[in-house]
Amino acid sequence: MKIKLLEPLRVPDEMIEDLSRPLKDLGHDFEYYNEKTTNTTELVKRSRDADIVMIANNPYPAEVIEAAEQLQLINVAFTGVDHVDKDAAKAKEIKIANAAGYSNQAVAELVIGLTLDLYRGITQGNADIRKNDFPGPFQGNEIKGKTVGIIGTGKIGTMTAKLFKAFGAQLIGYNRSEHKEAKELGLEYVELETLMQQSDIISVHLPLNDETKGIVSKEMLSKMKSSAILVNCARGPIIDNKALAELLNAGEIAGAGIDVFDMEPPLPADYPLLEAENTVLAPHVGYLTDEAMISRAYIAFENTLAFVKGEPQNIVQE
């Protein structure tokens, strides 16, 4: 088979060479592009004769999939696959795999970091103390004793719940199905409306699909306590971000920590959250740690090796 890694995985080239060696030893052709591209024409050129393509989190549109006549597997070195045109892949019976699990710890830790920043004013304090007109210390809050609502209790949501429990928080959660591991932490499942009403801290961990897009609507956001904060390290369009900005500016929500938006950064100058009060914004880095990048490279190549051996794994769409 012809296998092509279409973009860097943020690990050393030597590691790519080591991970690809078992594929080459089995007689497969491996090609690596160490410069990423979002240009459709270039992606078509790179993908045209591939049996397997390996990508990360850059768009992989229908035009590219339709031009790849031999393609059997789109191997996504990422958790979400919403940047791949799934309908185009399904129409050609091309399987899609992902690297779920590689960034569970990384994302969960960023959620805690954003929460601590909002609760203790770390970013604001850093800016204030560098001014000549330092206004004085910020009196914050503690996580201990707070009710944390986890929207989406999959692997990342459950890892986040574990970290919040270590701080002494009470846990409630919303998910389409209940997960044993989350319940063993003491998490109580409730309806989304109840979670929005009762939580002091809300953390979003749903995948983005037709069912979840906009699920945290203006109506749901309006049910939050005025003292509550919201953290989103999942996908931007799950939340009505325009409504979130409005409620933050009106003082009806105490704060928000946001790592994901309705589009990838850089954001347009008029994006509502850029001017929202009491926000800490990160440039979609929840997944991005040295450890997570190494983990995802291993998972991605394991997926490819399993596929060429006729034992597909981590398939999210047949």
Image: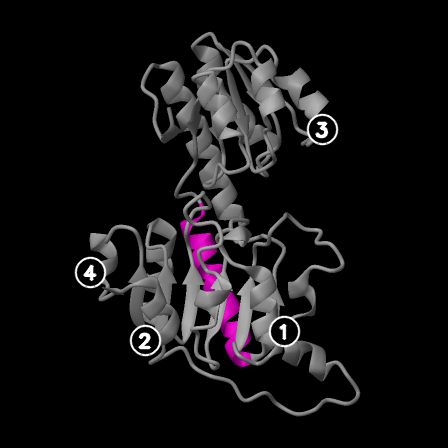
Which is in the foreground here, disc 2 or disc 3? 3
- Depth check, front residue: 254 or 120: 254
Does 119 appear in magenta?
yes
Residue 294: percent from left, percent from top: 49, 40
Label 3 element class: loop
Q: Which residue was labeled with disc 4?
A: 184
The type of residue carrying mark 4 is Glu
The colour scheme applied to this rendered structure is one colour
The stretch of residues the image draws in magenta is: 103-120
Residue neighbourhood size for the residue with mark 1, other residues' Cα within 10 Å, grouped as few (<14), some (14–19), many (≥20): few
The type of residue carrying mark 2 is Gly
Which is in the foreground here, disc 3 or disc 4? 3
Q: Earlier in the sequence, mark 3 or mark 4?
A: 3
Q: Which residue was labeled with disc 1?
A: 123
Q: How far apart are labels 2 and 3 at the CA level?
A: 48 Å
Residue 142: percent from left, percent from top: 43, 81
Residue neighbourhood size for the residue with mark 4, other residues' Cα within 10 Å, grouped as few (<14), some (14–19), many (≥20): few
Does 191 appear in magenta?
no
